[in-house]
Image (cartoon, grey):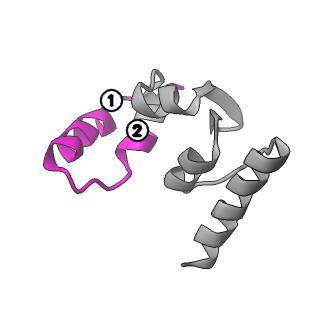
């Protein structure tokens, strides 16, 4: 198990056992999804989208959020094709 995985697991345990709330700032979207109940996506210092993590990841509304999620590599060819399409949409100003 990597150090990152151990830290993420520890954060999850602390959240569950202590009801701990965290402000977690990261660029690794997989880690953010794993440890977050709510997500805020920022662009140029401004929040462009926020909400429950599942909703933001599964149904992003802002073009910039769509582009960020589309940039994550996918092994499934259908998922990869959808992400390529999303990357071509213009980001919000």
Looking at the picture, how far across and down is residue 7, in whole percent?
A: 69, 67
Query: How busy is the neighbourhood of tag 1: few (under 14 within 10 Å), some, or many (20 plus)?
Result: few
Identified at 32% across, 39% down, the residue is: 87
25, 84: nearer the viewer: 25
Relative placement, left or right, of 57 versus 85 is right
Is residue 55 rendered to the left or right of residue 11? Answer: left
Compute the Cα span from label 1 to label 2.
Answer: 7 Å
- Which of the 4 image quadrants contains residue 27? bottom right
Quarter the N terminus occupies:
bottom right
Secondary structure of the residue carrying numbered label 2: helix
The structure residue drawn at horizontal position 42% and vertical position 42%, both measured from the top left corner, is 69
Q: Is residue 10 left or right of residue 74?
A: right
Residue 69 vs residue 46, the one in the foreground: 69
Q: Percent position (x, y) of residue 43?
A: 61, 37
Disc 1 + disc 2, Cβ < 8 Å: yes
- Please state, as top left, top right, bottom left or bottom right, where the C terminus lies in the image: top right
Percent across and percent down for residue 16 are 74, 46
Residue bounds of the magenta highlight: 68-93
Q: Which element type, helix, strand or loop, lies under badge 1?
A: loop
Question: In terms of depth relative to the viewer, which is nearer, 2 or 74?
Answer: 2
**Is 92 part of what is drawn in magenta?**
yes
**Residue depicted at 28% across the width and 40% down the height:** 83
Q: Residue furthest top?
A: 61
User: Circle 2 sits on which residue?
Assistant: 67
**Total labels drawn:** 2
Q: Is residue 93 above or below residue 73?
A: above
64 up-or-down from 76: above or below: above
Give residue 89's mark. 1
Mark before the other along the chain sequence, 1 or 2:
2
């Amino acid at each position: 198990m990597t150090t990152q995985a151990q830290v993420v697991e520890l954060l999850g345990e602390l959240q569950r056992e202590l009801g701990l709330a965290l402000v977690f700032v990261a660029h690794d979207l997989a880690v953010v999804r794993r440890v977050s109940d709510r997500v805020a996506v920022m662009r140029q210092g401004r929040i462009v989208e926020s909400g429950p993590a599942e909703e933001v990841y599964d149904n992003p509304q802002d073009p910039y959020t769509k582009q960020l999620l589309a940039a994550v590599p996918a092994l499934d060819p259908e998922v990869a094709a959808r992400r390529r399409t999303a990357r071509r949409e213009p980001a919000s100003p």
